[in-house]
Image (tube, rainbow, N blue to C red):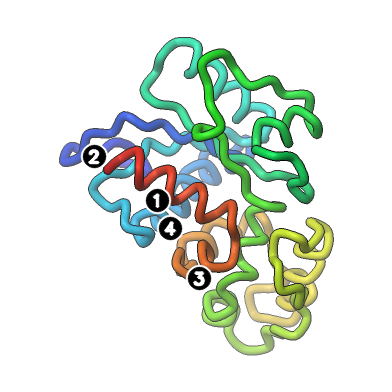
Amino acid sequence: MDPGRDRGDALVSIRLYVEGGGDSKKLKIACRKGFSQFLEKAGLAGRMPRIVACGGRENAYESFKTAQGTGDGQPMLLVDAEGPVLAAGPWQHLGARDGWNCPGGSTDHQCHLMVQVMESWFLADRNALTSFYGGRFKENALPGHRNIEQVPKQDVLRGLEDATRRTRKGPYSKGAHSFDLLGSLDPGRVEGAVAYAKRFLDALRNASA
């Protein structure tokens, strides 16, 4: 059974449409596995959402809209913010940045953002990064801003690449490393440092309680 799919011992009504996995079946499986491991460690084992790896963020949005319109479970959307969130809520942010409308019947509780990108979460758990990359990992190359959500996307990615350049695994790669890293994170560290990550995890906990 693929990681992140329905399990026989759990009633799964939430479908989580996530950005990630590209066009590769292998990467989509890795995406589901990474998110599954992260969410299980966040206390959702036994009441997991069904994780749908959608590839690009536009496809994630369109898949969410279709599910919302057909009443296919309880859909949630999780995409990169791709910048600082200055609006009052996620739909307002996506409307201003991407021109995406909030689908009829949907609420802000169904829309979640990785601010500014998924890799921002990695900055919250530097122990996981050090453990994953091992020797020659340069932690001091990572951005040092106290508010992780305010670190620009390009600085997050450049910092990860610079910090990992000389490690045995090589420079950070979104395809090869991203979802293994996601699955290794401590959710407590992430939600303690990233407000929108806590909002996302709390929404899942409350929906499946």
CA distance separating discs 4 and 3:
12 Å
Determine whether 197 is above or below 3 in the image. below
Determine the CA span between mark 3 and mark 1: 17 Å
Q: Callout 2, which amino acid?
A: Arg
- SS of the residue under disc 3: helix
- Where is residue 141 shown, x and y percent of the image? 78, 80
Q: Amino acid at mark 3?
A: Arg
Residue under the image location 40 percent in, 50 percent down:
36
Per the rendering, the mark at residue 7 is 2
Inspect this view and state whether residue 3 appears.
no
Up/down of 41 relative to 18, above or below: below
Going 34% across and 56% down the picture, which residue do you hit? 40
Instruction: Give residue 102's quadrant in the image.
Output: top right
Q: Position of residue 104 (x, y in %)?
A: 56, 13
Numbered disc in front, either 3 or 1: 3
Q: Earlier in the sequence, mark 3 or mark 2?
A: 2
Amino acid at the residue labelled 4: Phe
Quarter of the image where one finds residue 6: top left
Q: Residues within 10 Å of mark 3 (few under 14, many from 20)?
A: some
Q: Position of residue 43 (x, y in %)?
A: 32, 57
Q: Secondary structure at mark 4?
A: helix
The residue that label 3 is drawn on is: 189
Which residue bears the numbered disc 1?
Answer: 36
User: What residue sits 41% from the left and 14% below the top?
Assistant: 71
Of marks 4 and 2, the one in the foreground: 4
